[in-house]
Amino acid sequence: MTTDSLLLFIAAGLLLNLTPGPDVLYIVSHALRSGARAGMVAALGITTGCFVHIIAAAVGVSALMATSATAFTVLKWAGAAYLVYVGIRLLFFKIENAITLEATHVDLTRARGHIDYKVVFLRGFWTNALNPKVALFFLAFVPQFIAPAVEHKPLAFLLLGLLFNFNGLWVNLGWAVAAAWLAGRADVVQKSMHWLDRVAGALFIGFGIKLALTQAPHA
């Protein structure tokens, strides 16, 4: 991978991690209700769950490269369609589970002394690990940054996945801290989410089109 491609991968990964979704909602909701520490524990759980998809997808790439061109084409178009679909939803639709204003009126001191952080962590882990959309995302996104000439594609996929997850951890921790600090400023949070939706939506569509135009490695 060239330096430009690596920087593009890092930038895209950071932006996509900034995009509000189920994982972000889980982190922010805990931070709003119980403070930054609870949100950060939730972020650690979600990041740990993501390793399940990274390893599984890396094995999937290995199997994919060893199968027929037809199998590659089917997965390619499925991944491209998924990325474009997500991009269109981000551009033209509101988040279905958006954070509501009433969440900011929760007394943050009410439950801070009664939080089971182990439960928060495990629920975050399973929220991500059992989400098939996360696996599909990795299969659609990461292979675009692996050159066909790379000898050990599964290893390259694994390294890129770990880099994506490492960068995503700091973004998720940032969501937890920001949500706790902005608990009384819901209007600011919602405007930021609206802006991120539009930018990330365009990025998803671009990657979907790029994936659709990708040639099979053995072509």
Image (tube, rainbow, N blue to C red):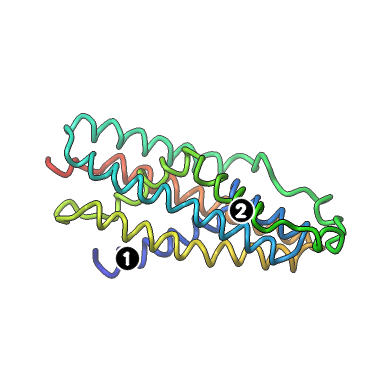
Q: Amino acid at mark 1?
A: Leu
In the image, 178 versus 27, the foreground residue is 27
Position of residue 72 measured from the top left corner of the image (x, y, whole percent): 23, 35
Label 1–label 2 contact, CB within 8 A? no
Rendering quarter of residue 80: top left
Above or below for 120 versus 70: below
What mark, if any, has residue 123 been given in the picture? Answer: none
Sequence-earlier tag: 1 or 2:
1
Residue at 42% from the left image edge and 42% from the top image edge? 135
Placement of the C terminus among the 4 image quadrants: top left
Quote the CA–CA distance across marks 1 and 2: 25 Å
Left or right: 72, with 118 as reference point: left
Residue at 37% from the left image edge and 38% from the top image edge? 79
Residue at 55% from the left image edge and 39% from the top image edge? 89
Left or right: 80, with 167 as reference point: left
Rendering quarter of residue 8: bottom left
Above or below for 120 versus 108: above
Identify the residue position indicated by label 1 in the image: 6
Q: Amino acid at mark 2?
A: Val
Position of residue 104 measured from the top left corner of the image (x, y, whole percent): 82, 56
Left or right: 28, with 7 as reference point: right
Q: Residues within 10 Å of mark 2 (few under 14, many from 20)?
A: many
Position of residue 217 measured from the top left corner of the image (x, y, whole percent): 16, 44
Circle 2 sits in a helix, a strand or a loop, which is it? helix
Left or right: 154, with 103 as reference point: left
Rendering quarter of residue 211: top left
Position of residue 61 measured from the top left corner of the image (x, y, whole percent): 27, 44
Identify the residue position indicated by label 2 in the image: 24
Task: Kindly report which numbered mark, 1 or 2, lies closer to the viewer in this rendering.
Answer: 2
